[in-house]
Image (spheres, rainbow, N blue to C red):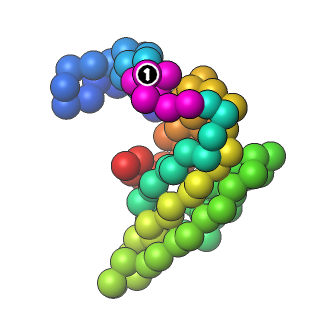
C-alpha cells in the first residue's frame, strides 16, 4: 500500500496500525489465538499468497466462496505472540492485491 494512504477516518496507514496495536494491547492477553478475516477475489494465487504469509505460524483456516464464486472469504485463527505480530501479519496481507481485511 502507498505510505500516503489515508482511510475514511482521515488516518494515514502508520497512524491506523499504531492505533490498532494500542487497542490490541489493551484488549488481548498475548500470546493467544487471534482471528483474522479476509475477503479477496477467487484466485488460487491470492490464496497461496495468504498461506505463505502464515506459513511459519500455527493456524487454522476456513474458506467459503461467495454465492457467485467471484470471491473467497477466509477466517484464520493464528497463534500470535504479541500485538506487533498481529500488526505485522496485517501489513503483509495488505500487500495482496484485492484483499479486504475485516
In the displayed structure, 93 sits above or below 98; it is above
Residue at position x 42%, y 60% in the image = 39
Answer with left or right where residue 42 lies relative to residue 49.
Answer: left
Residue at position x 45%, y 55% in the image = 38
Q: Position of residue 72 (x, y in %)?
A: 45, 70
Residue highlighted by disc 1: 26
Give the overall secondary structure of the magenta segment.
helix
Q: Name the one closer to the observer, 60 or 98.
A: 60
- Look at the image and say whether residue 37 sits in the magenta stretch: no
Looking at the image, which residue sits at the far left? 9
In the displayed structure, 5 sits above or below 94; it is above
The answer to whether residue 13 shows anywhere in this view is: no
Looking at the image, which residue sits at the far right? 56
Q: Which residues are magenta?
A: 23-29
Q: Position of residue 20 (x, y in %)?
A: 41, 25
Q: Position of residue 9 (x, y in %)?
A: 19, 25
Answer with left or right where residue 37 lies relative to residue 87.
Answer: left
* Within-10-Å neighbours for mark 1: few <14, some 14–19, many 20+: few
- Look at the image and say whether residue 25 sits in the magenta stretch: yes
The answer to whether residue 46 shows anywhere in this view is: yes
Secondary structure at numbered mark 1: helix
Residue at position x 45%, y 54% in the image = 37
Answer with left or right where residue 39 lies relative to residue 46.
Answer: left
Amino acid at each position: 500500500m502507498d505510505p500516503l494512504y489515508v482511510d475514511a477516518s482521515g488516518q494515514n496507514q502508520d497512524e491506523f496500525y499504531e492505533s490498532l496495536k494500542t487497542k490490541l494491547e489493551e484488549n488481548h492477553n498475548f500470546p493467544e489465538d487471534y482471528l483474522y478475516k479476509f475477503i479477496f477475489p477467487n484466485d488460487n494465487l491470492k490464496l497461496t499468497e495468504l498461506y505463505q504469509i502464515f506459513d511459519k505460524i500455527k493456524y487454522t483456516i476456513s474458506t467459503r466462496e461467495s454465492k457467485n464464486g467471484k470471491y473467497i472469504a477466509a477466517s484464520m485463527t493464528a497463534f500470535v505472540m504479541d500485538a506487533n505480530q498481529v500488526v505485522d501479519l496485517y501489513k503483509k496481507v495488505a500487500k495482496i492485491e484485492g484483499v479486504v481485511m475485516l
